[in-house]
Image (cartoon, coloured by chain):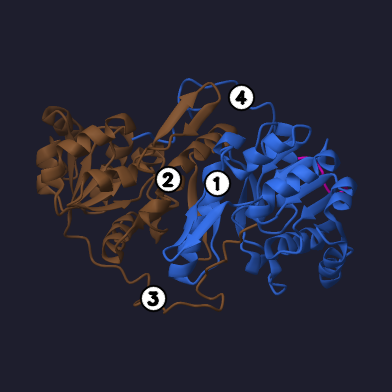
Chain colours: A brown, B blue
Amino acid sequence: MTSHDTGSADSGAAPKPPAKDPWDLPDVSGLVVGVLGGTGDQGRGLAYRLALAGQKVIIGSRAAERAEAAAAGIGLGVEGLDNAECARRSDVVIVAVPWDGHARTLEALRTELAGKLVVDCVNPLGFDKKGAYAVKPEEGSAAEQAAALLPDSRVTAAFHHLSAVLLQDTSLDEIDTDVMVLGESRADTDVVQALAARIPGMRGVFAGRLRNAHQVESLVANLISVNRRYKAHAGLRVTDV
Amino acid sequence: MTSHDTGSADSGAAPKPPAKDPWDLPDVSGLVVGVLGGTGDQGRGLAYRLALAGQKVIIGSRAAERAEAAAAGIGLGVEGLDNAECARRSDVVIVAVPWDGHARTLEALRTELAGKLVVDCVNPLGFDKKGAYAVKPEEGSAAEQAAALLPDSRVTAAFHHLSAVLLQDTSLDEIDTDVMVLGESRADTDVVQALAARIPGMRGVFAGRLRNAHQVESLVANLISVNRRYKAHAGLRVTDV
């Protein structure tokens, strides 16, 4: 079998050491975060947690009035706008739309998302009587589809394994989970990790390039099985990090 | 996006409750565990940890003398035999062979593995200058390939995310990680979970059917990225379980 220590930096054939401390992350407190699909459970939960942490958050939706209603429901200075205006006004744009509207939504926002840091958190899944199963997009993953559709944006992937129930539970002060962050540029993944770390209990952990996003996205099918068996809202922690 | 709470048992459309406590696992202390590919780093590490926990372990290899040498290196009552004899003598057979010998090895052992509980822990990965990436077997995953090649065995998948370095580090008393266990039969996955739980610090968590094994196997590519960035030997914990 292939041990995952293979290629580890301390296996002997070590490449050059990292340029800096991997936990030395940028200050992202001044960034405006948009959440496309922010009226859905996951998007609303993320918007709530980020706003609670002091981040300026804008919820985007196809219909501005639905975005406004979701924003009003959260309070904490959250605004609601239509998707295009949300993208335009934001520095970082979290994509939390349903998988079946993913390509269409992003294609329509190519101009507004140009130059933005895009964080895809969409999990392409199918469901049948046996539960959830992975769906593999032609591009490899939802994140790679986003990268293909948004050539002028900086696309990353993160926030896949969060429980929308826990995110929205106002009685919880902390979210006990790590967030796997994927992307091609260290500067971009550092920003997303720092954003995750703004939420108490949460930590952003770099977990590879976009070509390895499919398994991270589709692992949600396994977490659904975990939730069913244990009546839980499962998340993941990366150990030894 | 698809929240992983979807389909959760407490989401309203709850199916019948589990037949029993999910942590009420069988006593597996009397089972003989074979490790095919037990001369490799991962196999040797698993053999060591299981033997240390008091399990009777047999290492299998294509060449009996290499298996004997590996077993002697571990001690703890571990035996070394050729793969066929290892399979014949074992109740539970862990498959820890390299991916490129996976199909060939299992095909040759179909008779010996009939009726056995097989635990596949093989991660089909490719490597290039950018690191590791997922390889998708025609059957969907290594575990599904095993199930297709071994129609008379009870095939499960587990032990994918373990660090061979940590497993073999005799100064460590505990392995701080959960083990995702996949399979079609509750009785079989319970046995594998119980086996994982024999190792101090380790816990076996049911994580779905074999059709959802690919993402669990290929997540090792992400853990390799984690290891490189953080100079770690990463494992995973499932939270809220």
Up/down of B215 relative to A62, above or below = below
Q: Which residue is mark 4?
A: B17
For marks 4 and 1, the one nearer the N-term is: 4
Q: Which residue is mark 3?
A: A18
In whole angstroms, how far apart are the C-alphas of marks 4 and 1?
A: 26 Å
Quadrant of the rendered image containing residue B146: top right
For marks 2 and 3, the one nearer the N-term is: 3
Whether the residues at callouts 1 and 2 have beta carbons within 8 Å, the answer is: no
Amino acid type indicated by mark 4: Pro
Callout 2 secondary element: helix
Residue at coordinates 28% horizontally, 49% vertically from top-left? A119
User: How far across and how far down the image is residue A208, in percent?
Assistant: 41, 58
Amino acid type indicated by mark 1: Val
Callout 3 secondary element: loop
Callout 4 secondary element: loop
Q: Which residues are magenta?
A: B25-30
Give the numbered dot on residue B216.
1
